[in-house]
Image (cartoon, coloured by chain):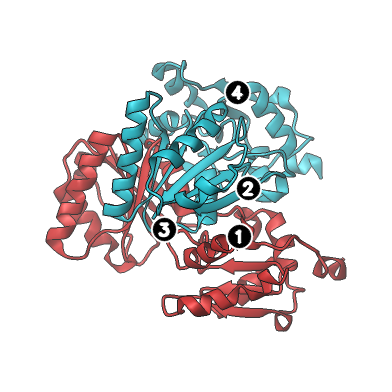
Chain colours: A red, B cyan
Amino acid sequence: MEDQQSTTKIEAALYLIPVELSDVPIDAVLPSGNAAIVRGIKHFIVENVRSARRFIKRCDRSINIDDLTFYPLNRHTAATEAAGYLAPLVAGEPMGVISEAGCPAVADPGADVVALAQQRGLRVKPLVGPSSIIMGLMGSGFNGQSFAFLGYLPIDNAARTKAMHDMERRIVRDDQTQIFIETPYRNNALIEQLVATLPPTLRLCIASDITGAEEHIVTHTIAQWRQLPKPDCNKRPTIFLLYR
Amino acid sequence: MEDQQSTTKIEAALYLIPVELSDVPIDAVLPSGNAAIVRGIKHFIVENVRSARRFIKRCDRSINIDDLTFYPLNRHTAATEAAGYLAPLVAGEPMGVISEAGCPAVADPGADVVALAQQRGLRVKPLVGPSSIIMGLMGSGFNGQSFAFLGYLPIDNAARTKAMHDMERRIVRDDQTQIFIETPYRNNALIEQLVATLPPTLRLCIASDITGAEEHIVTHTIAQWRQLPKPDCNKRPTIFLLYR
């Protein structure tokens, strides 16, 4: 059985392979088909080699890691170097992209190598996995017909307050849910600032540890959050959503 | 084994249960843990009763559909009626939300019932599944740190042209990927209009039949698309992405 698995033959493409967001059994958050694809790949472009190795072992302990080649991809990887990474795919070998957590190329460095693959007419195949953006949106009860993910809000206080008022305007004018994140150790400070800055009728959803044992996805109006004890999100992966 | 499965005991929550986007084996696109949760639920709020029954049978053929209660949710469901649907959950029974395809509450009617659950302080649990928005974004090579999903563009020609120029402005000013959809029989006309209206340097990704046998996710500049044969997207589920 294991021998059979390790010889899986798959189509040559750049597979975008999602990773769990939390410490849960892999079959709770990833289709079993993803592991079958991982078994068919020898060349992986990865955000972090150590954690990618561990992820591959979680997919299938029988995979021999020493047979695999890893190409590190991060903010320091030069564009020319990243272009060279695609040589095996150009030669007809399937390749994988693995990021630290969640979906590659969404809010992480994978997008550049996908853009290179698209430029060269290479096939790109995204796989299914957990996205805190989509799962937070699903759980919020907010408008899923129109939404924006903004990444991090600015750090500077004046710029940040302005960003909050910009979001408020887009919610009212465009009927668009606004989604954003913060560096985890500043989550609690952000919550205080949102609650102090935004109008009482807007709704704020705080979604922490999505898919994890401590998952907590709660929506209240700003007026309600002012009265309620705030969740402690210090250093916990959290996504924030705003809507009217 | 089947008897054991049918007695799965799960936490009382409103589970948001994604459905396949295409005609593929379920284990290619949904975690096996989702089927275990479906087995533990007797009350389903659904966009379409017939297709929800078929989906549940695909999860586990041993589930007895006649033991289940279905609550139809669509644009015609009154808010008061939808509120009544949550009675089993209020009484401590797990419930599920199932939409036609993809993730409930993202670009479909599920969001209102999630908002009602949040208002009443009921637990909401999104599950992992395929999202054409996220998978299109992953495959496009575009900015995943900032993006907006706009739903359908306006039908009226002048309003639609204005919407295209608004997207162009947001790409340049906010560095934000713009994502949108069209009624499937108008996909080809939209492609012609995008290519005729937008500046040559912008990039357009056309992502069709995501996860399906005919999956086709291709990014080119508008200038390149003007030269190339366009893919035939007539009546094929397609998502469009724009970026610089």
Q: Amino acid at mark 4?
A: Asn
Res. B126 visible in picture: no
**Residue A2 in the image: above or below residue B150:** below
User: Which residue is rendered at x = 63% and y = 63% of the image?
Assistant: A14
- Disc 2 is placed on an element classified as strand
Q: Residues within 10 Å of mark 3 (few under 14, many from 20)?
A: many
Tell me the tag on residue B143. Answer: 3
Which residue carries the number 1 mark? A121
Q: Amino acid at mark 3?
A: Asn
The answer to whether tags 3 and 4 share a subunit is yes
Circle 1 chain:
A
Q: Is residue A11 left or right of residue B127?
A: right
Residue B139 in the image: x percent, y percent?
55, 55
Q: Residues within 10 Å of mark 4 (few under 14, many from 20)?
A: some
- Disc 3 is placed on an element classified as loop
Q: Give the label, 3 or 4, closer to the camera.
A: 3
Asked whether the residues under the numbered discs 3 and 4 touch, taking CB atoms below 8 Å apart as contact, a structural biologist would say no
* Residues at marks 3 and 4, CA–CA distance in whole angstroms: 35 Å
**Residue A71 in the image: above or below residue B189:** below
Q: Is residue A190 left or right of residue B61?
A: left
Residue A233 in the image: x percent, y percent?
33, 60
Q: Amino acid at mark 1?
A: Gly
Name the N-terminal-most of marks 4 and 2. Answer: 4
Name the N-terminal-most of marks 2 and 3. Answer: 3
Circle 4 chain:
B
Which residue carries the number 2 mark? B216
User: Which residue is rendered at x = 42% and y = 61% of the image?
Assistant: A107
User: Which residue is rendered at x = 55% and y = 33% of the image?
Assistant: B188
Name the N-terminal-most of marks 3 and 4. Answer: 4
Q: Give the label, 1 or 2, closer to the camera.
A: 1
Residue B134 in the image: x percent, y percent?
50, 49
